[in-house]
Amino acid sequence: MTTPISPRVRKGGIVMLDPDLGIPRGFIVLQYNPDTVTRRLQPQSVGDQPDRSEILRLKGPPIETINVVAEIDATDQLAAPSDNPLVVTLGIQPQLSALEMLIYPSSVELIANEVLTLLGTIEILPMQSPLAVFVWNPVRITPVRITGIEITEEAFDTNLNPIRAKVTLDMRVLNVNDTGFLNPAGALYMVYQIEKEAMAIANAIQAVGTLAASVPT
């Protein structure tokens, strides 16, 4: 038996947690890992024009946004139709629906709120979505709020079921300024930031070693 040379690649995805208890509600594994992950960090400074004593002060962690473009393709599954009856019947609509439901309230909540409205309830509480956690690698696991989903369906079967699509996910990292510390989102964020700090320290130590080795004796 030959040993494969290429490393086994992890799959990125999104885990849904109960926002109060942190209990897993489900997960979505990306069929193909995106080729790029675009991140933008906006520092939270004290003000647009702080005085000299405040110029370097921060109000909290930066606002970090993440953008990924994922591909979903049913070609491989359609090549073995007996093993993938759902794909033959519906194409990739189930996978797309799973992603879309990240920003939908449940039908049960919609109906319950309508019933309360008809009964004359004065205040209807906003519906709460699960806590989405973006999982990319062991040190990039962070709570996020989905701010946008764009789906481009690129190919269809004879029943007009989509069989290939690109999905753009726009996410905003939830930090402790957004959530506080005493909940699953805040705890996950703190782990995420502490891991960043540890890697930055490791980089600084390596940089000192490199600099010392380059100094002539």
Image: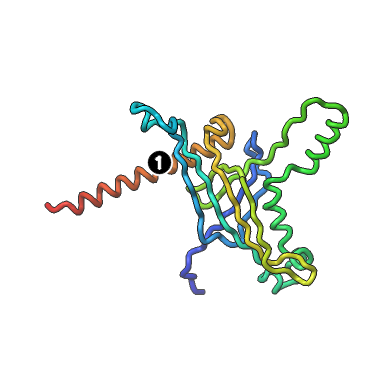
The residue where tag 1 is placed is 197
Residue that appears at 44% across and 39% down? 43
Label 1 CA crowd tier, 10 Å (few <14, some 14–19, many 20+): few
31 is higher (above) or lower (below) than 65: below
Depth check, front residue: 198 or 114: 114
Labels in figure, total: 1
Secondary structure found at label 1: helix
Give how far across and how far down residue 89 sits, in percent: 79, 66
113 is higher (above) or lower (below) than 138: above
Depth check, front residue: 144 or 49: 49
Residue that appears at 88% across and 28% down? 119
Give how far across and how far down residue 8 sits, in percent: 51, 63
Q: In this view, does 20 lie to the left or right of 117?
A: left
Q: How is the image coloured?
A: rainbow
Give how far across and how far down residue 197 sits, in percent: 40, 41
Residue that appears at 48% across and 47% down? 40
Depth check, front residue: 23 or 63: 63
Give how far across and how far down residue 56 sits, in percent: 36, 33
Residue that appears at 74% across and 71% down? 81
Q: Quadrant of residue 195?
A: top left
Depth check, front residue: 60 or 7: 60
Amino acid type shown at disc 1: Glu
Q: Residue furthest front?
A: 49
Q: Is residue 62 left or right of residue 33?
A: left
123 is higher (above) or lower (below) than 1: above
